[in-house]
Image: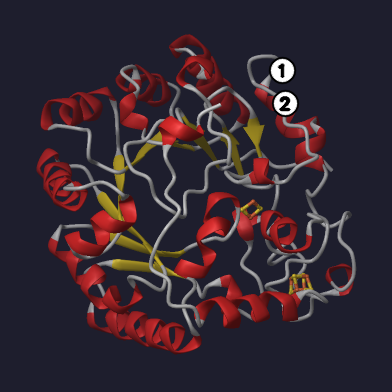
Amino acid sequence: MMPEPPLAVLAELTHRCPLQCPYCSNPLALERANREMATGEWLRAIAEAAALGCMQIHFSGGEPTVRPDLEKLVAGAAAAGLYTNLITSGVLCDRARLERLAAAGLEHVQLSFQDSGAEIGDHVGGYAGGHEKKCAFAALVRDVGLPLTANFVVHRQNLNHLTQMIDMAVALGAGRVEIANVQYYGWALKNRAALMPDRAQLDAMVEAVTAARERLKGVIAIDFVVPDYYASRPKSCMGGWGRRFLNISPSGHVLPCHAAESITGLHFDNVRQRPLADIWLHSEAFRVFRGTGWMPEPCRSCDRKEIDWGGCRCQAFAITGDAARTDPACALSEDHARLTGIAADEARRDGRDFVYRNYRTAAR
Ligand code: SF4
Ligand code: FES
């Protein structure tokens, strides 16, 4: 059966980034600026995504505003009929630039925060003054008339501020707040012991989100899922491998998810060399875990197999070294005890120091 067209494309325009987050999901070897696709190549890829049936494009990175041609790419996407979203750290974009982006057709901004306050926020991002700039940028977004989503990545060092984060998002005029637990693959694996929350923090987090949803009904939408290391069933990662989303890396590699390059041994085709539709429909990397035919037991006979699609391939690889195993977040997986053991062990440690992600030293 032919796969449905993707709903959305994540365009990772660059790996360049002024922040150094210890949970960065970009690959361990970042791509240098001189390997990034040129404006014309991106415009062609965007048109191919629209022709394939994509409805939305998310411009991301790294930090997408380091690309001076972002306005042209937004205009190209808008002209192709795509809904356009900018995922940004907000520290490099001034009012004039934001107004140009809005005029080019930008429809939504998703702004990442590291905490509700500057002390932890700047410590996590490894960028002095970053938190203040982000708050100022959020005000600009609302001023220019664009809808805003605030995104907070949460972990042991900031989870106790969860209610403050949600209240801050309301105060900044966000219509949606995403509470995203750190996903432990790629660079985040290096910092897992400094980031892993414990069970008591998790229980407090669920309680805080439940109370905030009740208190702020009709004011702000709150997206939240229980972190994998404390779940009994996995999330439906990417809505299933090769089913809803595709990701284009700065140099044009087409990936089923943003972290797919952490799975060694898979070959990813490049949109510079092969049409996007052909990659989506026929490439080995998209077909290998698409649907349910690849599944081992217990997934194969499970009634959730078309709900969570066997969970996350990147997590299966990170924990077991085999991307074709059941996601260890599932309590039915043979590897589940290994995952919960890691969580219990690392949550007990009290280290606060990070191995920072630094573009200048990591670009290949
Ligand atoms: Fe999902 Fe597989 Fe676990 Fe069933 S056994 S809940 S399909 S991960
Ligand atoms: Fe890659 Fe889940 S992050 S499949």
Picture quarter containing residue 156?
bottom left
User: Relative to residue 5, is residue 167 drawn left or right?
Assistant: left
**Comparing marks 2 and 1, which lies closer to the viewer?**
2
Query: Which of these two is toward me, 189 or 200?
Result: 189
Instruction: Look at the image and tell me in which quarter the C terminus lies.
Output: top right
Residue drawn where x is 52% and y is 48% of the image: 25
Query: Which of these two is toward me, 60 or 287?
Result: 60
Residue drawn where x is 18% and y is 59% of the image: 118
**Image: 70 above or below 95:** above
Q: Position of residue 173 (x, y in %)?
A: 16, 57
Cβ of mark 1 under 8 A from ligand 2: no
Q: Position of residue 226 (x, y in %)?
A: 51, 75
Query: Which of these two is toward me, 319 or 178?
Result: 319
Picture quarter containing residue 321?
bottom right
Residue drawn where x is 72% and y is 26% of the image: 269
Residue occupying the far top of the picture:
40
User: Relative to residue 26, is residue 1 drawn left or right?
Assistant: right
Task: Quickly name the residue at label 2.
Answer: 269
Instruction: Look at the image and tell me in which quarter the N terminus lies.
Output: top right
Compare marks 2 and 1 and give the one earlier in the sequence.
Answer: 2
Q: Is residue 169 visible?
A: no
Dot 1: element: loop
Dot 2: element: loop
Q: Position of residue 287 (x, y in %)?
A: 81, 41
Query: Around disc 2, counting alpha carbons within 10 Å, would you say few (fewer than 14), some (14 to 19), or many (20 or more)?
Result: many
Q: Are marks 2 and 1 in contact (CB under 8 Å)?
A: yes
User: Relative to residue 56, is residue 234 drawn left or right?
Assistant: right
Query: Around disc 1, counting alpha carbons within 10 Å, would you say few (fewer than 14), some (14 to 19), or many (20 or more)?
Result: few
Circle on res. 274: 1
Q: Amino acid at mark 1?
A: Arg
